[in-house]
Amino acid sequence: MIQFQQLTEEYMPRRRTSLKRKRADKKRYLRNLRIKRVLKKTIKKFQTLLSEKNISEAKTLLAKIFSQFDKAAKKRIIHPNTANRKKSRLARKLLKTT
């Protein structure tokens, strides 16, 4: 059985539109990946602020995280319900530490 990765590397599209689609998919994937990485970094920073009991900075960072989640959900990088669930959980963590 041929591995999927090998199949995609060996397969060369025949049509120009397929080549363009492949390039666009790669660009979109990299853009989405960058947005997800930034989001994860800010969440980790928020969690370290909570562990250090730095509540005032954590509150300001939480607003920034909410904005990032909303933008990612709007662009369908993550599902809107996932964004809402994660926002809710982060807000509850902040309330528990105060």
Image (cartoon, rainbow, N blue to C red):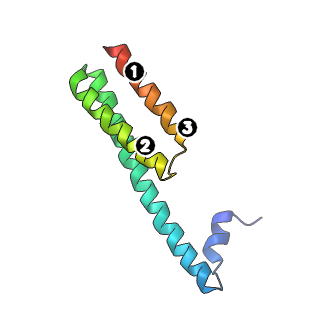
Query: In the rendered view of the protein, which quadrant contains the C terminus?
Result: top left
How far apart in space, not on screen, are marks 2 and 3 (Cα)? Answer: 10 Å
Q: Earlier in the sequence, mark 1 or mark 2?
A: 2
77 to the left or right of 40: right
Please give the residue where the numbered disc 2 appears in the rendered image: 70
How far apart in space, not on screen, are marks 1 and 3 (Cα)? Answer: 18 Å
How far apart in space, not on screen, are marks 1 and 2 (Cα)? Answer: 19 Å
Q: Which mark is residue 79?
A: none
Please give the residue where the numbered disc 1 appears in the rendered image: 93
Expressed as whole percent of the image width and height from the top left, the position of residue 59 reads: 28, 27
91 to the left or right of 64: right
Between marks 1 and 2 in the image, the one whose residue lies nearer the viewer: 2
The outermost residue toward the right is 1
Q: Residues within 10 Å of mark 2 (few under 14, many from 20)?
A: some
Q: Residue at image x 43%, y 43%?
A: 70
52 to the left or right of 86: left
Q: Residues within 10 Å of mark 1 (few under 14, many from 20)?
A: few
Q: Amino acid at mark 2?
A: Asp
Q: Earlier in the sequence, mark 1 or mark 3?
A: 3
Please give the residue where the numbered disc 3 appears in the rendered image: 81
Q: Residue at image x 42%, y 20%?
A: 92
Expressed as whole percent of the image width and height from the top left, the position of residue 19 reads: 57, 80
Q: Secondary structure at mark 2?
A: helix
Expressed as whole percent of the image width and height from the top left, the position of residue 91 reads: 39, 24
